Image: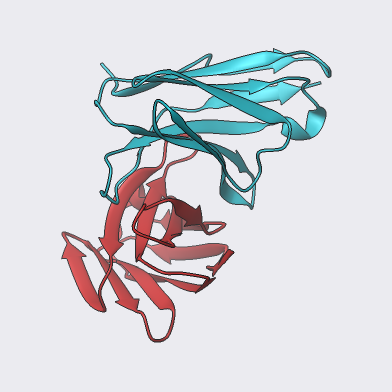
Chain colours: A red, B cyan
Amino acid sequence: GQSLEQPSEVTAVEGAIVQINCTYQTSGFYGLSWYQQHDGGAPTFLSYNALDGLEETGRFSSFLSRSDSYGYLLLQELQMKDSASYFCAVSGSNDYKLSFGAGTTVTVRA
Amino acid sequence: DADVTQTPRNRITKTGKRIMLECSQTKGHDRMYWYRQDPGLGLRLIYYSFDVKDINKGEISDGYSVSRQAQAKFSLSLESAIPNQTALYFCATSDPYQETQYFGPGTRLLVL
């Protein structure tokens, strides 16, 4: 089975940097994804890491260390619109079926 | 128009009733998924289908059934609804061998 841990809440001010950590225990591992969900809305894809290292997409970056079973999502230059829940999700095999973490609620304050 | 649609968007039903949630997609994807979301528990996979003739149970399939009527349509049924099935239900689609899943807007279900 799959088990993922991420912090439940993070609060930061506009312009700050937030790092959301995700540790996982899986019977197999193919990749780590991140999704964003605004309150009551549909989750939307942010990033995917299959190999160790940092992937950068605009203000958001995602990191993976396969040897440590660990990844993080980095949110830079925080904006009010970044207030949302962020989920890490593991693909246990190359079928890309996902197991999700419980989510981290990010609150951005002025 | 939205690529992944779900109907109804909100539903209130009573314990013991049979209900169906429907999902349609125009993305042309073979793979479709049903998830439920409960506060503090993230998204949990109920059923998934990798093509019209392929249906698989997810981690929480008890009390649910599905039907893949066509490549574009995937329905979730609650044969006899119970209050702990009150949740937000999402349908999602993906291309084979692609990591991105595309989610519908969700159906908020309340079972009284």
What is the x, y in percent for residue A65? 34, 81
Q: Vertically, is B62 above or below A88?
A: above
Screen quadrant of the C terminus of chain A:
bottom left
**Percent position of residue B22, x then y:** 50, 17
Which residue is located at x 55 percent, y 62 percent?
A9
Q: Quadrant of residue B88?
A: top right
Please name whichever residue, B103 or B54, is drawn nearer the observer in this view of the structure. B54
Judge left or right: residue A110 versus residue B22: left
Q: Nearer the viewer, residue A74 or B50?
A: B50
Q: Residue at x 50, y 55 (%)?
A: A100
Is B95 on the left or on the right of A92, as rendered? left
Residue farthest front in this picture:
B53
- Expressed as whole percent of the image width and height from the top left, the position of residue A93 reads 39, 61
* Residue A6 vertical position relative to residue B89 in the rendered view, above or below: below
Q: Is residue A3 left or right of residue B95?
A: right
Which quarter of the figure has residue A5?
bottom right
Residue A14 drawn above or below residue B18: below
Q: Which residue is found at the position 43% from the left and 55% from the top?
A: A86
In terms of depth relative to the viewer, which is nearer, A54 or A93?
Answer: A93
Image coordinates for residue B9, horizontal then vertical, percent? 52, 18
Hey, which quadrant is residue B6 in on the image? top left
